[in-house]
Amino acid sequence: MEFLQFLSWACIVFTVGMFSTGLTDLKKMRASKSADNVQFLPFLTTCLNNLGWLYYGILKTDGTLVLVNTIGACLQSLYILSYCHYTNDKRRVTSQTLLVGGVVCGGWLYFGVLLPQGESQLAQLGLTCSLFTISMYLSPLADLMEIVRTGSVERLSFSLTVATFLTSTSWTLYGLQLQDYYIMVPNTPGIVTSLIRFFLFWRFASVNQGVPSYKLIKI
């Protein structure tokens, strides 16, 4: 029980820390009064992911999941609103936001209204959240291949890689302790991709010893 409580706090601290890395983009947008060179889609997909896991945590009565994803959804909403304020392409941003809003409404209708309450509802929601989380962890693989091709890790953030590794490891162990494979399995790819990033830092960052070829997060 004590180890489970330790893992719970580790999940909260590391995950909130990872979500807080978006404050770097927020600071950049406020300083430049522009949303140029800031990606919008990760804010939307992370918010959608947070809302899915928040609902799963509510159904499972898991306080750790509820707390972490409530904070995550609030932070992502802040980033989304800030991006909408500073971007010049408001039509595209609005349409993408409405699309995600439609997905959220459709998901709530299916999982909250159409499905009967019980194990089947929890299992289908857990599977959906797991598959979405796995897709998010695997989505940067194309960038990793580009890094291998160019031999430069300039586009990678070392701080974010560390945060992702600690977060994924904490949730994997937390899910293992609870014997909840919907939590454990989707976080395993996060560990794997983080280890790949660490290898790329070791392999390519030493090419130019005098000039760091990776990005550190500055808040």
Image (cartoon, grey):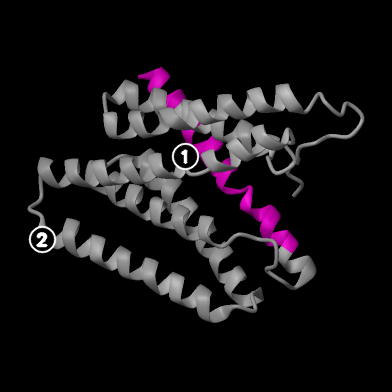
15 inside magenta stretch: yes
Closest to the camera, between mark 1 and mark 2, is 1
Q: Residue furthest left?
A: 116
Query: Which circle's residue, 1 or 2, is located before the other in the chain?
Result: 2
Q: Say which residue label 2 marks.
A: 114
* Residue that appears at 62% across and 30% down: 197
Q: Which residues are magenta?
A: 1-28
| Quarter assignment of residue 102 | bottom left
Indicate the secondary structure of the residue bearing disc 1: helix
Indicate the secondary structure of the residue bearing disc 2: helix
| Quarter assignment of residue 185 | top left
Majority secondary structure of magenta residues: helix
Q: Is residue 6 visible?
A: yes
Q: Determine whether label 1 and label 2 are within 8 Å by CB.
A: no
Disc marking residue 137: 1
35 inside magenta stretch: no
Q: Is residue 9 visible?
A: no
Report the amino acid beneath label 1.
Answer: Tyr
